Amino acid sequence: MRIYISADMEGVTGLVDAEDVQPGGRDYERGRLMMAEDVNAAVRGAITAGATDITVNDAHGPMRNILPESLHPAARLIRGKPKHMGMLEGLSPEHDAMICVGYHSRAGALGVLSHSFMGHEIEDMWLDGRPVGEIGLAHATAAAIGVALTVLTGDDCACTEMAAWDASVRTVAVKYARDRFAADLRSAEEARATIEEAVATSLAAPPKASVAAAEAPSTLTVRWQSASVASTLLGIPGVTSADTRTVQAQGTLPSLYRLFGVWMRVASSLTNQPPYC
């Protein structure tokens, strides 16, 4: 059984502030170790379920957060950037299931460290007219590839967002949002034991994703904080404007996901703002 783990950081056990998740932050070094331990709990659960091949993609920020020596030796690590598929780099139809560790709610939600991909640079996103963030877009893209998302961990708001997209996905709330930079924390030991158990249980009989939706085109719409970003993106064939700060494009997933990655690289070249202001 081949398992794919996409690991973000904002939804990791104990982390609540930009200082916890940004390189150079006061508590970043501790945060990256906490991230590795949540991932390791998922790896242990996968091994219990019989996984023989486990890939972990470091999907947060610089994508160099997990120290290779901190990762469970049974897992392989995809580290660094750029990556054509970003948070889903390395995911393929050969995987039997996907697990999302440390995910967070979308921009506008009052979840811990909530945002959509680029902090305040992205004000909102829609997939086929439905508000979407990293959770929904990852779920839809994985389904198009033919891989079912089976477990997601994060704060309670992330878990609620996941349930709205697909109630069959098992969720683990490792903390409960009090505000965007405050949470009621579960103990690290309890949270990781729950992650391990959830993964082991869900993978006992992993569901198969339906790829029927992948045949139909989808529309991805993104509203940017900066009109300059939206204007520049209109130079990409197939990108149209809905207003001065909102662009959209049609395509099939996962190609549309990869195109969105190009949009973010363009936006990064035009802006130089901290992600949590």
Image (cartoon, rainbow, N blue to C red):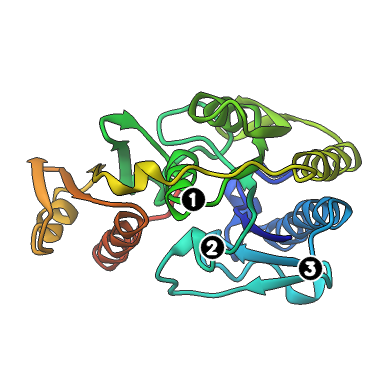
> Reading the chain from its start, which is encountered first: label 2 or label 1?
2
Q: Residue 91, labelled with which disc?
A: 2
Residue occupying image coordinates x 45% and y 63% = 86
Q: Residue 71, labelled with which disc?
A: 3
> Element at badge 1?
helix
User: Between tags 2 and 3, which lies in front?
Assistant: 2
Residue occupying image coordinates x 75% and y 55% = 39
Residue occupying image coordinates x 82% and y 32% = 186
* Lateral position of residue 136 relative to residue 245, left or right: right
| Residue 28 against residue 18 in the figure, above or below | below
Q: Nearer the viewer, residue 248 or 97?
A: 97
Which image quarter holds the N terminus? bottom right
Q: Position of residue 163 (x, y in %)?
A: 57, 26
* Lateral position of residue 154 relative to residue 215, left or right: right
Residue 195 picture quarter: top right
Q: Mark 1 is on which residue type? A: Ala
Query: To which residue does mark 1 refer?
Result: 142
